[in-house]
Image (cartoon, grey):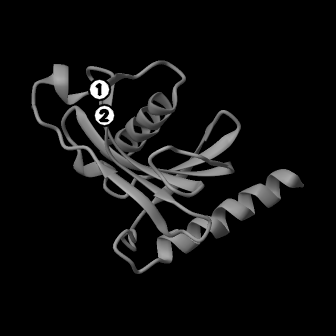
Amino acid sequence: MLKYIYILYILVFCTGLFCNKGMYAQNIDSTWVPISYEGKLVYIDLSEINSFTGDDIYVWALESHAEPLEIEAVDRKVYKTKTYYLLNKKLRKYSLREVIYYDRENNVLKDFTYNAVSQDPEYKYSYPIFNGSLADLILQRCLREIESVTQ
């Protein structure tokens, strides 16, 4: 029962963000799908996934925090984090392009944008994708979606 309440809470909570008409609102055509990571649901937006034909995949991920986060660079507690990932399927590396932190009422607390200075793969991708990591699960889900459309 608690599991269903938690899923309902996530859906209702996320709906408020997606319907927001502000600067950080999502496109109406967004296709958010859940993936399970460490006992929680993280939603990724697959609406643009089929436009990526090379090795790079850009994707938004949205995570609600059961226990709010306290982050030094953010002056209030963080209840949701939305992250824009750049994943490279061939190199199995990724970088963060943008991170947005939200309060309990879905107000933006802080927005960090990371611009790639170099196109050199050694500097373009900051982190390796480890098996079983959140980045790995996001990449695998994106690849399944791409494969299902190309068949």
Q: Residue at x 37, y 68 (%)?
A: 24
In the displayed structure image, the side of residue 70 where residue 112 appears, left or right: left
In the displayed structure image, the side of residue 85 where residue 108 appears, left or right: right
Q: Residue at x 12, y 36 (%)?
A: 117
Residue 4 rendering spot, x and y as whole percentages: 81, 57
Whether pointer 2 and pointer 1 mark residues with C-beta atoms closer than 8 Å, the reply is yes
Kindly indicate the quadrant of the structure image that contains residue 122: top left
Query: Looking at the rendered structure, which numbered label has been put on residue 95?
Result: 2
Q: Residues within 10 Å of mark 2 (few under 14, many from 20)?
A: many
Residue 12 rendering spot, x and y as whole percentages: 66, 69
Circle 2 sits in a helix, a strand or a loop, which is it? strand
Q: Residues within 10 Å of mark 1 (few under 14, many from 20)?
A: few
Residue tagged by mark 1? Answer: 126
Q: Residue at x 34, y 24 (%)?
A: 127
Residue 130 rendering spot, x and y as whole percentages: 45, 19
Q: Is residue 46 above or below residue 135?
A: below
Real-space Cα distance between discs 2 and 1? 5 Å
Q: Is residue 90 above or below residue 15?
A: above
Q: Is residue 3 above or below residue 31?
A: above
